[in-house]
Amino acid sequence: MNEEEIKKIIDSTEQYDKVKEYSLLGMIGDFYTRKMLSMVIFVWSLGILFMAGAIYSGVKFFKTDDTQYQIMYAAIFMTLIQWVGSLKIFAWQIIHRNSIKRNIKRLELRIAELGQVIQKQ
């Protein structure tokens, strides 16, 4: 890779980062890309499944008169809602992983450029 190619990649990366990396919508947009499709399907399917279970247990909680079953449905409801929150945290960590990978790639390119400058001297 010659110096011009490295400068071109770095310049395009910096321009991309200024526009997209530091905005919340840009980070969320990175999550909903073609390469992240399997992760998006996984997160959304589990989220919908857990939310449906929480709604079902909430409805059953108010329909039953037995205290033991009310405690069971309340525990199921709270557990499933916590799982939904955990899925959101998981998705947020995946979004940050992409950002970290981009920053590492930018550093690798700058180190390669520095190495070429040192070799010329």
Image: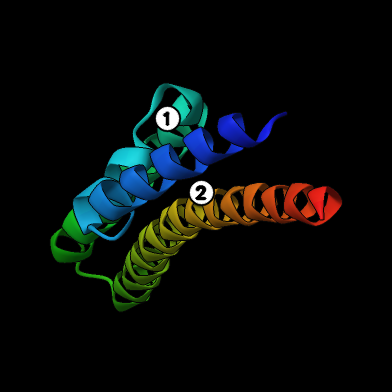
Closer to the chain start, of discs 2 and 1, is 1
Residue 109 lies, with reference to residue 111, above or below; the image says: above
Residue annotated with mark 2? 98
Q: How is the model colour-coded? A: rainbow
The span from disc 2 to disc 1 (Cα, nearest Å) is 17 Å
Residue 9 lies, with reference to residue 50, above or below; the image says: above
Q: Are marks 2 and 1 in contact (CB under 8 Å)?
A: no
91 and 21: which is toward the camera = 21
For residue 85, say whether it is visible: yes
Q: Quadrant of the N terminus?
A: top right
Residue 118 in the image, given as x and y percentages of width and height: 80, 57
For residue 52, say whether it is visible: no
Residue 69 in the image, given as x and y percentages of width and height: 35, 68
Can you tell which quarter of the image residue 70 is in? bottom left
At label 2, counting other C-alpha atoms closer than 10 Å, the crowd grade (few under 14, some 14-19, many 20 or more) is some
Residue 77 lies, with reference to residue 55, above or below; the image says: below
Q: How many marks?
A: 2
Q: Nearer the viewer, mark 2 or mark 1?
A: 2
114 and 69: which is toward the camera = 114
Q: Quadrant of the C terminus?
A: bottom right
- Secondary structure beneath label 1: helix
52 and 117: which is toward the camera = 117
Residue annotated with mark 1? 41
At label 1, counting other C-alpha atoms closer than 10 Å, the crowd grade (few under 14, some 14-19, many 20 or more) is few
Q: Residue at x 24, y 49 (%)?
A: 19
Q: Residue at x 34, y 34 (%)?
A: 32
Residue 44 lies, with reference to residue 99, above or below; the image says: above
Q: Residue furthest top?
A: 34
Callout 1, which amino acid?
Ile
Residue 44 in the image, given as x and y percentages of width and height: 36, 38
Callout 2, which amino acid?
Asn
